[in-house]
Amino acid sequence: MGFADSEQKGTGLRQRLYSRAFIIENPNKPDDTFIYLVTDLAAGDTAVRDGVLKGLAAMGPEYSRYGSHNLALSGTHSHSGPGAWLNYLLPQIPSAGFDKAAYKAVVDGILLSIKRAHETRTPTRLSFDTKDLVDGNINRSPYSYLANPEEERKRYQYDTDKTLSLIRFDRASDDKTTGILTFYSVHGTSLFANNTLVSGDNKGVAAYLFERAAKGDDRFADGFIAGFSQSSVGDTSPNTLGPFCEDTGLDCKFV
């Protein structure tokens, strides 16, 4: 996916990318259900969504409750995933077109995650909380932010969204946590344009580390899933030390 630079070509794999599927259903009303997908990709895509919907329709009557009305496809906005699978012309230009094999891998992986989530549905308690993480992002254009009206800026404590929201899924039978789903605003650009390896970037690494830490911990169920979904990403940057000149090492001028 990269940074829209035709010279930035992939050379290998640093970290595998995943689709994490969350299915939330009312047990007393099975039709009242939806799927939320977190993929280690730059974004959702209409072609991928269409492929997933067609794949679900082909999986039999058990999956007929899922369709365009109750499926949400999101990407973590990593710039370090593979390219050439999006439906739109603009991202196809630097990736030299569309690659059907890449597209099919994305669709097949998403369908497998939905199948696994569907087959492991169980009565669960949901809990929700929020917390400000002030050191997790910065506004990548604070000078531009100051162009907003002063009365509007006074409504907010920070110049970008600092709130992390978390939904926790605890299995009713034994209180073990089967998954978490978080929302936090930070661009997937911890790796720069000189990176040529496939990676889930900061949210992909966060999910990997959380899931690895949960293994062997009695508080978490086997197969625990950590979804680090994107939020109001906008002008948020993970490079919290701020911008600096590569040539001199000095801080960039504020303007």
Image (spheres, rainbow, N blue to C red):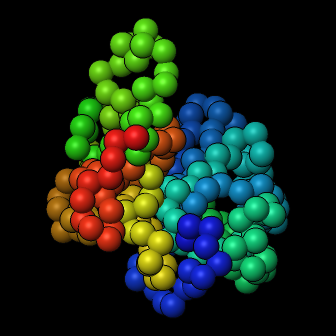
Q: Position of residue 16 (x, y in %)?
A: 46, 78
Q: In this picture, is 204 found above or below 7? A: above
Q: Position of residue 217 (x, y in %)?
A: 17, 62
Quadrant position of residue 24: top right
x 57%, y 39%: residue: 25
142 left or right of 63 in image? left
Quadrant position of residue 92: bottom right
Q: Position of residue 14 (x, y in %)?
A: 40, 83
x 72%, y 48%: residue: 66
Q: In this picture, is 136 found above or below 160? A: below
Viewer-proximal residue among 220 and 205: 205
Quarter of the rendering occupied by the C terminus = top left
Residue 7 visible in the displayed image: yes
Q: Position of residue 53 (x, y in %)?
A: 78, 57
129 left or right of 121 in image? left
Q: In this picture, is 102 found above or below 243? A: below
x 44%, y 78%: residue: 195
Quarter of the rendering occupied by the N terminus = bottom right
Considering every residue shown, the one lying at the far top of the view is 151
